[in-house]
Amino acid sequence: MPLGLHAIRPKRFAIIEPNRADIERSNRQYVLNVGKKMGSYPPQRRTVSGYKRTGNYGRGWTAPGAVRASAEEATLVNRVGYSSYVGGPWPQSGHDKGERQTREMHGRGWPSITDVARAEKKNYVQLVNKALKGRPG
């Protein structure tokens, strides 16, 4: 059986020059999506005290200055004083006490920023890939 040699030709690939504005838009959209999910409230349980929700926590995710984004990074901040106790990072994320979601709030169904950000990661990857290909979404 004769042995044949064939030249291996590498596939052509395009050099991508990402548009910084598209990447910034993707980063901003990601944190806006996270903020929207963080601002949704679980069903309220009946309380003996008759407590009614004010809506301050939910509005804190969309307040002016809550979102900052650049091509390098994006931040989402809720400046409501108790927000870290309601939807802060879940304890296993390594944050000190007082900077994390309480077990009671987790048990009542409040989303943790850690869980929401991780769940939105798939969408973020798609946003960035589109931006890198010059098709921001």
Image: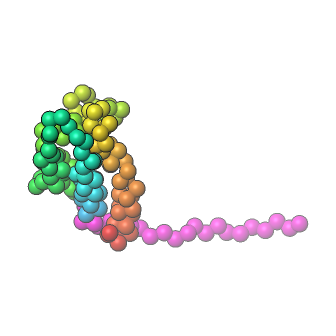
- Compared across the picture, whether 36 is left or right of 17 comes to left
Q: Residue at x 75, y 67 (%)?
A: 5
- Compared across the picture, whether 129 is left or right of 35 comes to right
Q: Residue at x 15, y 46 (%)?
A: 53
In this rendered view, identify the residue nearer to me: 46 or 127. Answer: 46
Please report the bounds of the magenta region as a residue range: 1-24
In this rendered view, identify the residue nearer to me: 96 or 128. Answer: 96
From the top left corner, tell me how far across and down residue 118 is, in percent: 37, 48
Q: Is residue 126 above or below residue 51?
A: below
From the top left corner, tell me how far across and down residue 56 is, in percent: 12, 48
From the top left corner, tell me how far across and down residue 42 is, in percent: 27, 47
Q: Residue at x 12, y 47 (%)?
A: 54
Was residue 9 drawn as part of the magenta stretch in this picture? yes
- Compared across the picture, whether 73 is left or right of 50 comes to right
In this rendered view, identify the residue nearer to me: 99 or 3. Answer: 99
Q: Is residue 12 above or below residue 85?
A: below
- Give the image quarter of residue 130: bottom left
Q: Is residue 12 visible?
A: yes
From the top left corner, tell me how far across and down residue 30 is, in percent: 29, 57
Q: Main secondary structure of the magenta part?
A: loop
- Give the color scheme: rainbow, by chain, secondary structure or one colour: rainbow
In this rendered view, identify the residue nearer to me: 88 or 44. Answer: 44
Q: Is residue 72 above or below residue 83?
A: below
Was residue 82 drawn as part of the magenta stretch in this picture? no
Q: Is residue 60 visible?
A: no
Q: Quadrant of the C terminus?
A: bottom left
- Give the image quarter of residue 63: bottom left
Query: Which residue extends farthest right?
Result: 1
Q: Residue at x 31, y 42 (%)?
A: 109
Q: Quadrant of the N terminus?
A: bottom right
- Give the image quarter of residue 125: bottom left
